[in-house]
Image: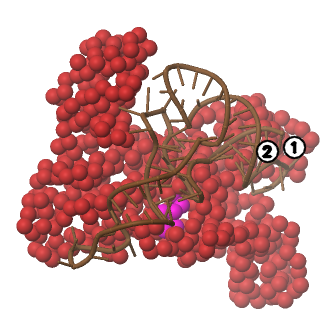
Chain colours: A red, B brown
Amino acid sequence: MNIVAEVEQQLKNEIEAAILKAELASKEEMPEIILETPKEKEHGDYATNMAMQLARIAKKAPKQIAEEIVEQIDTGQASVKKIDIAGPGFINFFMDQSFLTKVVTEINEAKSQYGKSDHGAGKKVQIEFVSANPTGTLHLGHARGAAYGDALANVMEKAGYEVDREYYINDAGNQINLLAKSIEARYFQAVGHDVEMPEDSYRGKDIIELANDLYKEHGNHYVDVTEEERLEAFRQHGLDHLLERIKKDLEEYRVPFDTWFSETSLYETGVIGTVVDQLRENGYVYEQDGATWFKSTDFGDDKDRVLVKQDGTYTYLTPDIAYHQNKIDRGFDELINVWGADHHGYVNRMKAAIQALGNPKDILDIKIVQIVHLYQDGEKVKMSKRTGKAVTMQELIDEVGLDATRYFFIMRSNDSHLDFDMDLATSESNENPVYYVQYAHARICSMLKQAEEKGVDVNAEADVSLLTSEKEIDLLKRLGDYPQVIAEAANKKMPHRIPQYVFELAGDLHSFYNAEKVIDLENAEQTHARIALIKAVRIVIQDALNLIGVHAPEQM
RNA sequence: GUCCCAGUAGCUCAGUAGGAUAGAGCAACAGCCUUCUAAGCUGUGGGUCGGGCGUUCGAAUCGCUCCUGGGACACCA
């Protein structure tokens, strides 16, 4: 456990002991001891609202309860310097902050391990994200989902979960047939035939390229073969190439996956039928109008859903149910799906299916990533999937850069619509949060380099107790918060807490830089202490950026 | 019509296990480079937390209701 958490725990123990000693509540009645960090510095380093919480149990006024608690607290134990009672009954603790300096030593020893916790207790979690159909290249929405899923996975791993990242490849079903037909039409056009695109076909330029490649390689060969042979060849060609392209894009985007799961494999092993049988056995399946229905309304869905169509084929839902059961059978304690906003209507039926198969409701958590709007030159960038003019992930990265793309996608809460300001993302100025944070890192590297050039031993033993100025304390506190920030980002599945945090840490660093001189050849002791401090800051900035897939440059 | 998400400063957004006087960045205004990177720092102004009702010691936060914006509502995937 890190030093800050230790001190907080100790203080909580003291508070609880004091409440028991004052006989305000019994062990059984004891509410959870909540310690918060007040916004106002006059309210101390920590505050607790226990007096208000206990008002009902102890049947006394909060102010009086607060006084009784304070009387019983053993201040010597937990580095408490002063205690105040304020407002409606808050107890404010002013700490002897010398313990904070230990965080520097702790970070410099732990390096990238700092911030780790066992909060997740080794719980096995699977995060399924992106999972774009292999019928085109990845676009904007996928990029946001990829950034979110990857950052969440990293954060949860750091918080002590065992995380598996998976991509579900929808390589079966109608959309793949449509893909084959789309390529076919483009192929005939390449050959020189005047053919119309099929209805609802994929009209992106990637499809044209695929068809042109086929023409270049095979010439007129596919004009004369049977339609069946032609479509099969095009289907396979399209799938292979588009999937390869998706994998390549994600790799460049620094988003790795542990597992690529093929939908087709579900058909091959016959588990889809098994799952339908299971649902029927559990009493949630009926036949009507020649189709097989799932009674999802039993679990709060709007209407019942078709599992097997009149023509005997499955709907999209059915293999997906089998897929989710397969995930559960693989032994994960929790499944997290990251879906685009256009799939949110799907949430209830999937959760219904999970329950109908006898699984606990909470095993599946679906995170919806909201729509992205691009802005350039103050104008909204229009896009349309049908005409194939969607902005692809690759185009966006080419335009604004990888680091900015990832940072911008992750800095906002996933369930809030995102206005992506491309001008801001590419601006090399203090308006741009990515540069602001990266600059803090580069600045530290530069200082360390200068120190070495001036003959300062940057690895010298440092007396961190010398770090007592206001800006230094601010930095120490911020550094101490890091493990808690990670744990919370993981628990609440809110990885946007990370860029928020690192932005604040960068601000503290810049502020410190302007207020204090780090390298002072007249004062070696202080120089060593401050170098130890900025080294710790560098480690945390680096680590936080790493979690969200952004590079920490040594020079800018 | 039903469901989901959102509505907080001029703009983009934090704040979501209920806490004290609601925050940040940008924009506006006023300052700081002979000094470790000014891609930086310091300060000022700026609010009916969409409206209303409720829950309680206390609500941006929880509940109900209405308004606005976006999305989803197939025997498509």
When the figure is inspected, residue A77 is found, relative to residue A407, above or below; the finding is above
Where is residue A445 drawn, in percent x and y? Answer: 26, 70
| Residue type marked 2 | Leu
The foreground one among A55 and A397 is A55
What is the chain identity of the residue bearing mark 2?
Answer: A
- What quarter of the picture does the C terminus of chain A occupy? bottom left
Disc 1 is placed on an element classified as strand
Q: Where is residue B35 drawn, in percent x and y?
A: 21, 75
- For residue A208, say whether it is visible: yes
Give yes or no for residue A93 being in the magenta stretch: no
- Asked if labels 1 and 2 touch by Cβ distance under 8 angstroms, the answer is yes
Q: Which residue is painted at 79% across and 50% down in the image?
A: A314
Badge 1 density bin: few <14, some 14–19, many ≥20, Cα 10 Å? some
Q: Quadrant of residue A396?
A: bottom right
In the drawing, what numbered circle is on residue A240?
none
Q: Is residue A197 left or right of residue A414?
A: right
Magenta range is: A404-410
